[in-house]
Image (spheres, grey):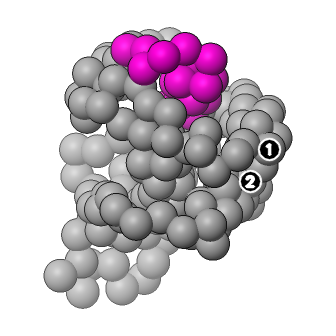
Amino acid sequence: MNDLRYPIGQFELMQHETLELRNSWIEDVSRISPILRQTVQNLSTEQLLLQYRPGSWTVRQVVHHMADNDMNAFIRFKRALTEDNPTASSYREDLWAELSDYETPVETSLVLLEAIHDRFTAILRTLHPSDFQRSFTSPTHGLMSLDAALQRFSWHGRHHIAQITSIFQKDRYL
């Protein structure tokens, strides 16, 4: 069944991380912003207003949401690396998507994502394996190790890019 909301499937936490898996998730972090840029850079204003499913966000809203989400994720990681099990703040992504900054050109969020991902990748590549066992408490997901957060972060970027690309697949409604 083709699920428009979860084109790559829902997030499933892998319980037994390996160095190879962790490195692939870190590479995902380094690739998300260039792939997203390539995906949306030639879209028209009308295409940026398309929804990936009825009642969903527009492409532009998804791009801006990705920047908001990734800023928050970066801060959660840094806090978990420098504090003992901090409580992460949450945000109302549905309400953030209604704010006026979501009307700005997607370029603003693409540049922001590139900067965040450059810094995020720089940190991730220097962490010791034991650092990934550090944790924070998420209001929505409970206690979360950085390994689990990295997996979720990798999935989140790929998930939203797949939502955007699904709009332009000719057979998506078959």
Q: In which quarter of the image is the N terminus?
A: bottom left
Q: In the image, is residue 19 above or below residue 101?
A: below
Which residues are drawn in magenta? 68-87
102 relative position to 36: left or right: left
Q: Residue at label 2? A: 30
* Front residue of this view, candidates 105 and 148: 148
Give residue 126's mark: 1
- Residue 161 image point, x, y percent: 52, 58
* Front residue of this view, candidates 67 and 58: 67
Furthest-left residue in this view: 1
Q: Is mark 1 on a helix, strand or loop?
A: loop
Going 67% across and 31% down the picture, which residue do you hit? 109
Give residue 111's mark: none
Identify the main secondary structure in magenta.
helix
Q: In which quarter of the image is the C terminus?
A: bottom left
* Disc 2 packing (10 Å; few <14; some 14–19; many ≥20): many
Going 30% across and 31% down the picture, which residue do you hit? 143
* Front residue of this view, candidates 78 and 74: 78
- Three-letter amino acid code of the residue under disc 2: Ser
- Residue 56 image point, x, y percent: 29, 44
